[in-house]
Image: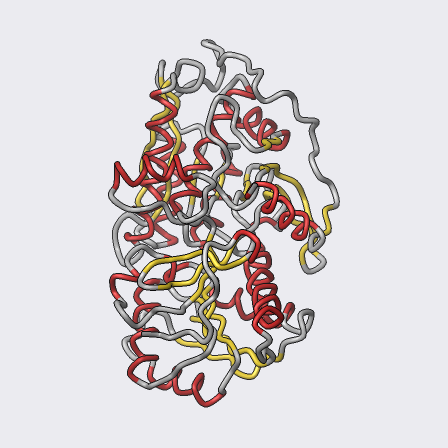
Amino acid sequence: MITGKIKCFIIRRYTMKKIIFGILIAAATMSTVTALGANDANGASGGNTIKIGAMYALSGDKAAIGNNIMRGVDFAVEMINAQGGVNGKKLEVVRGDTQGDPKVGRSVAERLITQDNVKAILGCHQSTITAIAAQVCEQYKIPELTAISTVDNLSSQGLEYFFRMCPTNTDYVEDQYMYLKDLAAKKNIPMKNIAIFADNSNIGQELIRCSHNLAPKYGFNIVAEVQYSGGTTDLTSEVLKLRNANPDAVLCESYIADAILFTKTLKEQNAHPPVIVAKANGFADPSFIPATPGISNGIASVVEYSADLPKGADINAKFKAKFGIDMNGHSAESFTAVWILKTAFEAAGSTDGTKVRDALIAMHIKDQFPNGPKIILPYNEIRFGDEIIDGKKHTHNNIPATVAIAQIQNGAWSTVWPFDVAAKDVQYPAPLK
């Protein structure tokens, strides 16, 4: 069974982490819940509804990602409400358009909490905005759950109301290096010299930082570190630097417009790295493949979900029937995050922020949500705990979270790693055509 294979991979991930606290509050049986009190002092948002805020870029150059994330949110809310909601109360999503702007993000978080009376916030995509929202949520004692933001230090600030469902950047990059090491062994190919391609954003700098920490651990040399300004219109010089470095593999991080430009420039400059592995983001955006037809085959990426795995196939089929596209990592993670909040509200028996926080800390979901779907992501447990990353304590991370690697083959994503759950074999070298 694929579940067993994924569990084996999770155990492997556990060996990479130093967990220092685990669960702080013993998990009660999650399927046994207390009805939300009608006289809850911080009660449901408007009688028969519970409002949750969703903070993402719904306009501007990050809107494609933000609106895709919202598909997962809306799909989960629709499913939950069709099944009776949260102990009879409907979930209501209040959208907050950050426009991809940190200054706007602060005002959005304030408005969602003080005017719209949301009882939890989902967000954000960009880690800089997530950090701002987390500070606002901390002030008002409202839980924030991010399903997308990966910058490590988000969870090292000692915040009591911030929770991260997705893996950290360290997890993502470590999986990239594990993939390269496994690929070299499987294909018996040279894999020593690594080039880094990243923008000057916070997330791009994280790839560089994590690579310098992890490359030596896995026996790799970084032979080129190519940085650029996000939103540029010309990547010729950067691509030429990569070509001249002649690396065995390129690890990259870009938002969608830059990812498209990078791929087109590789073609224009006749640059053909044998392995390209992206840390998701723009390369995993639904618009990436249509924008790079015939020139992106062979590019691989970290993925938080893949439609070609049996796990979650039933959920994805319903999602595709509604939206016309498969789930990807962003929509699958946001779908899962809504179910986490639903479970926390029920376990808390309240919408009070502190009680919901405590329910999140105590949460331990195995395989399937109470009265809900199975976990559709590449792991089988959800539990928030503390860990040490680069000598610093990080709190409320989803300890079991991990990822897979997919590669574009014949114009579509195919899971290629871990090898024991792969849908297809890796194309090596990357054809880029």
Chosen colour scheme: secondary structure
Q: Position of residue 49 (x, y in %)?
A: 36, 19
The residue lying furthest to the bottom in this view is: 244
Given residues 386 and 368, the one toward you in this image is: 368
| Apparent side of residue 321 relative to residue 350 in the rendered image (left or right) | left
Residue 38 place in picture, x, y as percent: 45, 9
| Identity of the residue drawn at 51% across and 68% down | 205
51 to the left or right of 210: left
On-image quarter of the C terminus: bottom left
Q: Is residue 355 above or below residue 258?
A: above
**Quarter residue 126 falls in:** bottom left
Q: Quadrant of the N terminus?
A: top right
Foreground pick, 178 / 203? 178
On the picture, is 396 further left or further right than 301? right
Which residue corresponds to the image point at 47% horizontal and 9% vertical from the top-left? 39
The one nearer the camera, 257 or 59, is: 257
Residue occupying the point 43% across, 19% down: 86
Image location (x, y in percent) of residue 3: 57, 41
Total numbered labels placed on residues in the image:
0
Determine whether 144 is above or below 131 in the image: above
In the picture, measured across the screen, residue 210 lies left or right of residue 240, that is right
Position of 242 relative to 5 (above/below): below
